[in-house]
């Protein structure tokens, strides 16, 4: 019955959307391009003069084109770009040189060659509150809000972009409180919606039965046969006798128990996670439904832009400490979280989980996931078009590899300095595959250290010789400074590290929970 009702509502919403679309005179606007991912990638290759891309290696170690897992072959160009040397060869020795010269240089290279540029004419986002609900998450009273960020599409009404977000704040803590923003691929839902009373449920069921009988008179005989049956039942209520949250509890419950709020952001409501979607979403809206140019932003930068717009909203919430908003993600969303943190200095801290290539792992290393895995395969849409150049085998400009990139991931991590940045990984045995190159991420984190120290923050507490430092054993965290590393003994998730991340974050932010 519930599924039937949801279907009916979905049909209603569909017809409303169609009616709105019919009212638009599409002849007034550029025709919206519809490409497959392969067609879109081919279009970009043509723009760049690329004839042939190298395909990414296989994750299957028995395949002929298997990825390299031999450390002796993993470093074709072991020397990284010096994060504290400017383009003209000058050493950066002061904070002013970093902020005014070197940091802008690094940002320019990342925008041009990897993640793309956010256009200057991105339309305004207006946030509306769809639902506000007082709920209980376990023993904790919360206020939960379902928010929609409506992007102004008046310049190109053929594309709608509505950012989907849920914000959950504890009500038993004196605010304002820190908040962790988390990327996700499922539509955010309220954690524990308040339930109607038994009397209200009876009215709802009576009305629903009447509606069903009108829709199909045969339903009356069924309901008469089972007179006590209620098609719609209450969801389980809060368990006041449940044990207090611990390290095995869901991360959201650990956050609430520590006096934090959290919000979940649906990436697909900002930009699709595929190449075919690049003429839709926020990228397509700004480009008026046309294909990208080589320096245009990819999905990672678009998701980061969406996170920044969500932070715009959080800055208006009295119960939120907007200077203590963190960003979190795992895998592709770990990449997006790092990009968000690097480009928007308003974010107070980051938890970067198992991010691999395009995140914390060095681009120059050839171990597991490769540059070609992103640029030459189905994940090219994460990046700017120019990134394809570094998987090029034949082109008008010759052949290029990751060694030709002017920047690398240690510099992306350095852009987060001096703000607290926690790099998290699991182990291959539990599913955090070798493909992610945990060693390459550790090297990058070590190499980012000098910038943290220059800006008066603490790094990992080891030397900055990224070629000689050895990755610490699993469960041995380096968490004494603003730059932190910990490899847990779980899989492709950062959940096991939350019990360590939260105390570390409280220390870095100097936050102490105060009960009401």
Image: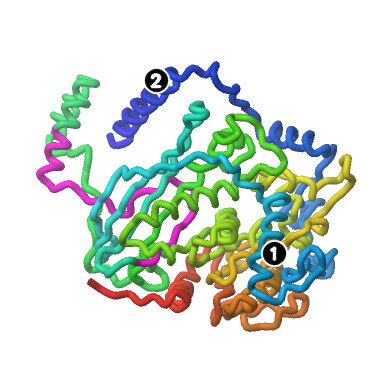
| Residue at x-position 83% and y-position 39% | 50
Quarter residue 227 falls in: top left
Closer to us: 249 or 92: 92
Q: Quadrant of residue 96?
A: bottom right
Is residue 123 located in the magenta-colored stretch of the structure? Answer: no
Tell me, yes or no, whether the highlighted magenta stretch contains residue 205: yes
Q: Which mark is residue 476?
A: none
Q: Is residue 299 left or right of residue 240?
A: right
SS type, badge 2: helix
Element marked by disc 1: helix
- What percent of the width, then of the height, locates residue 122? 54, 41
Given residues 450 and 492, the one toward you in this image is 450
Please tell me which residue is depicted at 47% across the width and 76% down the height of the picture: 508
User: Magenta segment range?
Assistant: 177-206
Residue 331 seen in this snapshot: no
CA–CA distance in space, label 1 to label 2: 52 Å
Residue where numbered disc 1 is placed:
101
Quarter of the image for the C terminus: give it: bottom left
Q: List the residue tagged with mark 2.
A: 19
Question: Residue 151: horizontal and vertical position, in percent?
Answer: 46, 38
- Would you say residue 138 is visible in this rendering? yes
């Amino acid at each position: 019955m519930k599924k039937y009702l949801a279907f009916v509502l979905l049909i209603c919403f569909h017809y409303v959307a169609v009616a709105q679309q019919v009212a638009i005179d599409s002849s007034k606007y550029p025709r919206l391009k519809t490409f497959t991912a392969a067609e879109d990638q081919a279009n970009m290759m043509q723009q760049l003069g690329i004839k042939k891309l190298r395909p990414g290696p296989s994750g299957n170690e028995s395949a002929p084109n298997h990825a390299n897992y031999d450390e002796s072959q993993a470093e074709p160009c072991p020397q990284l770009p010096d994060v504290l040397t400017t383009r003209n060869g000058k050493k950066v020795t002061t904070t002013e040189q970093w902020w005014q010269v070197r940091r802008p240089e690094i940002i320019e290279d990342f925008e041009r060659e990897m993640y793309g540029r956010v256009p200057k004419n991105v339309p305004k986002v207006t946030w509306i509150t769809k639902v506000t609900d007082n709920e209980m998450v376990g023993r904790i009273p919360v206020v939960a809000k379902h928010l929609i960020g409506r992007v102004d599409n008046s310049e190109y009404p053929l594309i709608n972009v509505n950012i989907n977000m849920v914000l959950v704040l504890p009500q038993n803590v004196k605010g304002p409180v820190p908040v962790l923003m988390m990327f996700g691929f499922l539509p955010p839902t309220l954690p524990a919606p308040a339930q109607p009373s038994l009397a209200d449920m009876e009215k709802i069921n009576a009305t629903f039965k009447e509606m069903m009988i009108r829709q199909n008179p045969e339903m009356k005989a069924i309901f008469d046969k089972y007179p006590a049956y209620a098609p719609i039942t209450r969801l389980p209520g809060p368990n006041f006798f449940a044990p207090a949250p611990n390290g095995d509890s869901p991360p959201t419950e650990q956050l609430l128990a520590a006096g934090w709020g959290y919000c979940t952001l649906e990436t697909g409501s900002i930009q699709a996670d595929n190449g075919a979607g690049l003429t839709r979403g926020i990228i397509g809206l700004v480009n008026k439904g046309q294909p990208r140019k080589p320096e245009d932003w990819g999905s990672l930068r678009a998701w980061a832009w969406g996170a920044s717009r969500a932070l715009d909203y959080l800055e208006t919430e009295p119960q939120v400490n907007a200077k203590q908003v963190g960003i979190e993600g795992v895998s592709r969303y770990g990449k997006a979280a790092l990009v968000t943190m690097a480009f928007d200095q308003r974010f107070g801290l980051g938890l970067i989980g198992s991010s691999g290539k395009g995140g914390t792992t060095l681009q120059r290393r050839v171990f597991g996931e490769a540059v070609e895995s992103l640029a030459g395969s189905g994940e090219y849409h994460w990046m700017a078009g120019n990134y394809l150049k570094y998987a090029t085998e034949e082109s008008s400009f010759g052949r290029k590899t990751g060694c030709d990139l002017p920047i690398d991931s240690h510099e992306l991590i350095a852009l987060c300095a001096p703000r607290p940045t926690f790099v998290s990984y699991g182990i291959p045995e539990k599913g955090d595959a070798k493909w992610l190159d945990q060693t390459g991420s550790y090297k990058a984190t070590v190499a980012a250290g000098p910038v943290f120290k220059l800006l008066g923050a603490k790094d990992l507490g080891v030397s900055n010789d990224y070629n000689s430092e050895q990755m610490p054993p699993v469960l041995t965290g380096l968490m004494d400074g603003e730059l932190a590393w910990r490899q847990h003994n779980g899989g492709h998730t950062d959940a096991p590290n939350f019990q360590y991340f939260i105390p570390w974050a409280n220390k870095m932010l100097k936050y102490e929970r105060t009960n009401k």
